[in-house]
Image (cartoon, coloured by chain):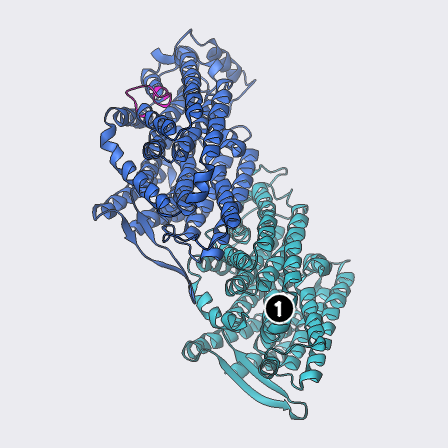
Chain colours: A cyan, B blue
Amino acid sequence: MLATSVALPFPLYALTKRLKSSFVKLFSIIPSTSLILLLLLAVDFSRLGSLSFKYSWIPQYGVSFGLLLDGLSLPLLVAAASITLLSMVYSALTVRSPEYYFCFSLFYAGVIGVLLAVDLLQFYVFWELMLVPCFFIILFWGSPGRAHITAYKFFFFTHVGSILILIGFIMIGLRLGSLSMADITLKLSGATDVVLTQATLLITIGFLIKLAVFPLHAWLPDAYCYSPLPLTVVMSSVMMVATTYGIFRIPFGVLGVLASGFAGQLMLIGVVSMVYGSAMALAQRDLRRMLSYSSISHAGYVVFGASTLTTLGLAGSIFYALNSAICKGLLFMCSGVYGEKAFSEDLEELRGVAVKMPLTSTFFLLAALSLGGLPPFAGFIGEWMLFGGGFQRGWIYALLAVAGALLTFPYFLWAIYRMFVSSSIRSLENVTEANWRTLIPLLPLGLATVILGVAPSPVLEVLYPVVEAVTP
Amino acid sequence: MMLLTLLLPLLIAMLIVILTARGLRIGRFYACLASSTALSLSLIMMLLSVLRGIPAYEGYGWIRMGGLIVGFDLFLDWLNLPLAFAIASLCLVSSVYSFEYMKDKHDIELYYALLLFYAVGMLGVTLSTNLIQFFLFFEAMNIPAYFLVSLWGTRKARVIGVKYILYMVAGGLCLLAGILWFYSLTGTLDLNPPRGLLNGVDAFSARVIAFLMFVGFAVKMGVFPFHSWLPDFHGEAPVPIHALLSAVMIKLGAYGLIRVVFTFFPSVIKGWSPALSVLALITMFWGALMALVQRDFKRVLAYSSVNQMGYILLGISSLTPIGVVGGLYHMLTHGVAKGSLLYCAGSLVHSAGTKYIDKLGGLAWKMPITATVALIGALSIAGTPPLGGFASELMLFTGTFEAGFHLVCLLGLASTALTAAYYLWTVRRMFFGERAWGLDELYERYVKRIEIPDEGVPRPFEMVSESPLVMVVPMMLIALFVTLLGVFPHLFLPPFKLAADAILALMGGTP
């Protein structure tokens, strides 16, 4: 069953590529199939606790191809599959080229592969599979004039990250003689040495580049702003989910003993990133740029929560990442709707737009409040849990982080102020509310952030065993 | 039952929002009817749950992860009972009162929906049983408050709303840091924690946590160095919302202070008691002096709230039984009296079209009921027997004296004279004295389109008349209640006495 959820995309795009452009909607079969399969698997999951499947791939070097579905990958997979599905539905209204959806599905296959991998080499293969289609989508469908430079910048940065990860994997493989995650955990069991620590450091830096944490963030704002919007939606949500998963699974999960050595520095990076992203977001006029910088800030939260190395902090951090994927997807979709219906994504020109587009603006408000950490939405749950973990670890960093959080809300407040409260500076006569086809993909995301805030326990209960095992 | 107290208004508010967003305007009458019904039902639900015995308790699950359990439990004991009832009833009164007062305003359905959200937020704060749930409501209620004032406020309300949210988010983060730090040391989030919780906690951490939490609550209360949002935000809020802000919302800060900081950190608070009294005194004087120099009636009332929060802080920080009872009772008497004054301000804006004191004068013969109610409210807050304010102020000053803060007590009494001064002077200038030529002038400027005030439609002096019954009846009921609070204090005091005893027992139990 697990095998099909990954294998299904491959024949499908070979098939769909031959078809006419009106059939591009067929591509949405891929994420919907995996969603249905995931629902079926969830039944098994609730009985067994975790599901795995394994066969030998390159036996000479002990490389195996396997799939693992546990408490960490299940919620993230559900989120990734649903957001991909929604953004496919969303982009079906604008883009009609089969090649575009071909790349899109490849990217999705990469994400699924990453989330299910049991072996470091397998993880890396899918990791690269995630990167390459993104590059081509930006290159061919990005904003005219900026697409080339953005695509190469994106490729350069993330590829350097991938190579660091690969070097780290190879160092570990050579040292321990195995690339299987389960074997590595067994063999490590308390042992530390210089090579392994360096490898862990390299891997962590690789992931931090992809997560766009402060000093390694330079690719992100451009990539988010000049990509076609549906790609921005999935990069800001699905790709971030995959990266978060990578961080939790490999440096903190498999190599937990080694990663705990530089948790303090990571916490500091997290705080700096929080503050930097928020401060830059506050200075933006363009809605999409503001959201891009806020992603840097949210990456800071996730890193901070993870590096507390407490059950509360780790669980909070994953929950926060999950919610920020949902809300970021929603916010970027909203920004697309504004661009289409209000003819601008400039926050100044969007002043007073809420009167004309109440539904879209309500979704925007929900997501902004949730990401701003205001109760009663899901963002608040993640935020207090990861700060709570911070205090369990040590109050100095935690106080710093809370002080940094002071900056998180103002930029959303400023946007909300301009859209809802302030009066418009230009004529909004031609602005109308989007039709229901455009709004349908927004609805489940808006509901999700409210529901996760009211009833977070199901997700937290699923996460708990994994987080408990990771906590040193 | 208690869950329904929160759920009913919440669901009705969501229904209104959804209908409005879909473009279905239900109209002023049905919006008012829906919100008033929801609030009355939630009052009834609260009564029903209390009838089975106090403390009433209901448990529901919320966050569960391994050993971490954060419930969504609700309870009512003697401390939060009067506050919860005051919130629900005043929201109901404001909802009815808005029917006429907000008659010509835009998007009235949304206004009612936000009013309900706001009511749910405030009720949630009082009913909460653990710190995370408490914080959730404590922060969540700022969202509707922000929109209510930004969208329907006067003059610079939009900018002032931003100031409010920034103050609240900053205060909230201090509180959150305190809560989480506390949790990391003790492992409990319960609002009624077991005794001897802080035995293992070092004195430094305890002090910093208590300070962080105090700042969080002091921002909400508007205590002196953190008060600057209060006059602006209150002053420009629409009157029915201003009534809720002044009469109940800022009391929630005091409630949090006494429920959380006092009972969690008794030894720290005992050490700080003199300092808190002095801070209270500064707040009292600052509020009173600033109130004296305002020309906007609503700003007078806003500064008076700062001044009166000082009284409450003075009472509870005396840590003597009678002082705490006085402080708690003052929360009720001031809330009710301030409510009556605010509804009078609304009546003035509605009938005379202005809230500026220098434009008004001699209106007592035109608006006799408004004038009477305003006088009763003003005298009560100034501490005149036999009104409600006298009873509570007498007790809280006695408590301060008993605690040994003689000088503070004497100076506090002196500030009462200032309170009486600004209130009586204001009432005299608005309702008595010579005929208000300012009103005619304002009307002339309005007719010639030179100046269009955004709070109401100006009328010439001769055409001013008493406000409609929908506004006057709630005012009269509240004024009656103010009088009852002072004439028969023994009817209302027992819950406050029990609450104060419980708190002092909790504080005395730990070293």
* Front one among A433 and B456: B456
Give the image location of residue A367, x and y in percent: 53, 53
Q: Is residue B371 above or below residue A439?
A: above
* Front one among B196 and A5: B196
Secondary structure beneath label 1: helix
* Front one among A185 and A426: A185
Q: Residue at x 72, y 67 (%)?
A: A158
Q: Residues within 10 Å of mark 1 (few under 14, many from 20)?
A: some
**Is residue B405 visible to the viewer in this orientation of the structure?**
yes
Q: Is residue A298 above or below residue B463?
A: below
Residue interval drawn in magenta: B378-388
Q: Is residue A32 above or below residue B290?
A: below
Give the image location of residue A299, x and y in percent: 62, 59
> What amino acid is labelled 1 in the image?
Ser
Q: Extreme left residue here?
A: B52
Quarter of the view holding residue A354: top right
Quarter of the view holding residue A185: bottom right
Decide if residue B430 is on the left or right side of residue A31.
left
**Is residue A101 visible to the viewer in this orientation of the structure?**
no
Q: Chain of mark 1?
A: A
Q: Which residue is mark 1?
A: A260
Q: Is residue B354 magenta?
A: no
How many marks the image carries: the answer is: 1
Decide if residue A138 is on the left or right side of residue A404.
right
Give the image location of residue B434, x and y in percent: 42, 6
Decide if residue B426 is on the left or right side of residue A125.
left
Give the image location of residue A389, x and y in percent: 53, 60
Q: Extreme top residue here?
A: B434
Q: Is residue A176 above or below residue A242?
A: below
